[in-house]
Image (tube, rainbow, N blue to C red):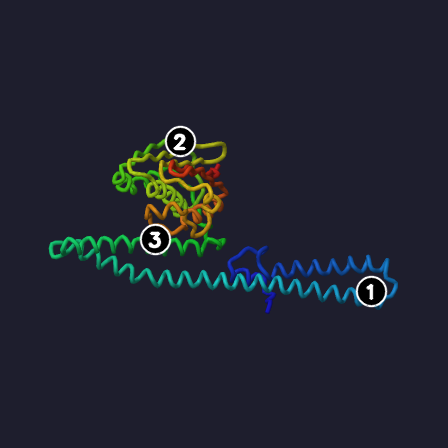
Amino acid sequence: MISFKIFSECKKYKIPLWQCPQFLFLILGLVIIFSIIFTYLIGAKYIQDLATLTLLICFLTIVLFILAFSIVNSFENLLSVSRLKSEFIEIVSHSLRTPLTNLNWTIDFFLTKNPNKIEKEQIEQLRFLKESSKRMEDLISKLLIVSRLEDPTFFQSKEEISIEEILNDIIQKAKDKIEKLKLNLELKIQKDLPKIFANPFYLKIVLESLLDNAICYNKESGKIEIELEKKGKNIYFEIKDTGVGIPKEDQKYIFQKFFRSENIAKFQIPGTGLSLFITKKIIENLGGKIGFESIENKGSRFWFLIPTKK
């Protein structure tokens, strides 16, 4: 049953007013009224019998009302299912985090406190378990972010930040991975870049995802090039790699949720297929654009533009 408490319903579904089913029902109601008036004015010219005209208008009104009710009710059911799905993901994700935290603590205890009492094979298994646990934590974090992306309040917290500082911090944390694969990292950062108005947490997710992809999908002794500069009223970021690339037939799906290119399977690179989906959503929310170019077995180039604060 449709409720007419428009603002409370919109708040419940966490959507803007113009997307709320109750608001849409109100708009459709106005459309029905204008349609009836228009039909009456046209019908009065060509139909002399008042009873026939009245029946025609009544029939049109009933049909339009049923259609409007069915459409709005379908939207409301879809929103309810979407809300329940998001709540389910949040509940399950939070429930999984506690045992994972306990598991990590136990693994760290054995690896750091009693290394001499554990055989070499057992240490390797514990490290493998630690890596698997980290991947599970990463999946949980990304699922939580995906479930909140449609919430308009998700991106409201913003501040003046330096994208250069965040980038340098992320590169520093990824230094061990880069050295392990013997990758050559080349930076081209323009001096005196203006700051942007964004949430540092979400921007960090974007930069970490793009850099992590350039590292994980690269080849040993490969190259990564990062450019950061001001272009007009935007900050331009670009990252190139000499990695596995993306097949042409898969490129149209690359920003879709849970999508992973088929050529990744043979390299046995773990992943969720959520990073680029989340990255695109965040960039678009910041009023920016994102794109890429890729050639299979030669590498990829990802770029984005974000408006500056000024």
Residue 53 found in image quarter: bottom right
* Residue receiving disc 2: 192
Please provide percent x and percent y for residue 180.
25, 40
* Residue 51 left/right relative to 135: right
Amino acid on which disc 3 is placed: Asp
Per the rendering, the mark at residue 53 is 1
Q: Secondary structure at mark 3?
A: helix
* Quarter of the image where the N terminus is located: bottom right
Q: Residue 276: percent from the left, percent from the top?
A: 42, 46
Whole-angstrom CA distance, mark 3 to mark 1, is: 65 Å
Q: Which mark is residue 138?
A: 3
Answer whether labels 3 and 1 touch (C-beta < 8 Å): no
Q: Secondary structure at mark 1?
A: helix
User: Which image quadrant is residue 194 in?
Assistant: top left
Q: Is residue 182 placed above or below 282 in the rendered structure? A: above
Residue 151 at what x, y percent from top left? 48, 55
Between tags 1 and 2, which lies in front?
1
Query: 227 or 260: nearer the eye?
Result: 260
Name the spot of residue 149 as percent of width and height, x first: 46, 53
Q: Mark 3 or mark 2, which has the lower sequence index?
A: 3
Q: Is residue 69 left or right of residue 295?
A: right
Q: Amino acid at mark 1?
A: Leu
Element type where label 2 sits in the image: loop
Q: Nearer the viewer, residue 215 or 106?
A: 215
Residue at 37% across / 46% down in the picture? Answer: 264
CA gap between label 3 and label 2 equals 34 Å
